[in-house]
Image (spheres, grey):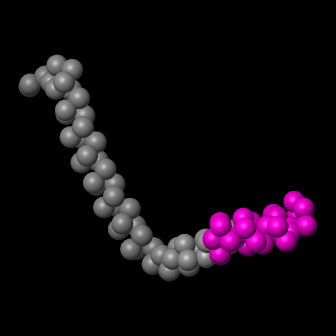
Amino acid sequence: MNVVYVRNSRLRESSGAEGGARILTEALNNYLAPIRARRAEFAKDPTYVAGVLRRGIERANAEAESTIIAVRRAMGMVYET
């Protein structure tokens, strides 16, 4: 179900706010169903999820480190030891 369908047909058939809320809830649940299914598949393999998170942390730390170095150079705060 898409927003245009809800807006153009079913919403007009609803009876007030309650009917509109029901239709909106149905549309959102239909939209989120594949996302929820994928999340459930990931939940079955916590080792994989931990690996993805670990690799993401490593990439973020590397990017942050290079950014900090660039900022320090730009500010003249590089102190050679």
Residue 52 falls in image quadrant? bottom left
Q: Does 74 sit above or below residue 49?
A: above
The image quadrant where one finds the C terminus is top left
Residue 65 falls in image quadrant? top left
Residue 50 percent coordinates (x, y)? 40, 67
Residue 75 lies left or right of residue 40; in this view the side is left
Residue 15 magenta-highlighted: yes
Q: Does 64 sit above or below residue 40?
A: above
Magenta-highlighted residues: 1-26
**What secondary structure characterizes most of the magenta part?**
helix
Residue 76 magenta-highlighted: no
Q: Residue at x 42, y 70 (%)?
A: 49
Residue 16 lies left or right of residue 27; in this view the side is right
Q: Residue at x 28, y 42 (%)?
A: 64
Q: How many marks?
A: 0
The image quadrant where one finds the N terminus is bottom right
Residue 28 percent coordinates (x, y)? 67, 68
Residue 42 percent coordinates (x, y)? 48, 76
Is residue 14 something one can see in this rendering?
A: yes
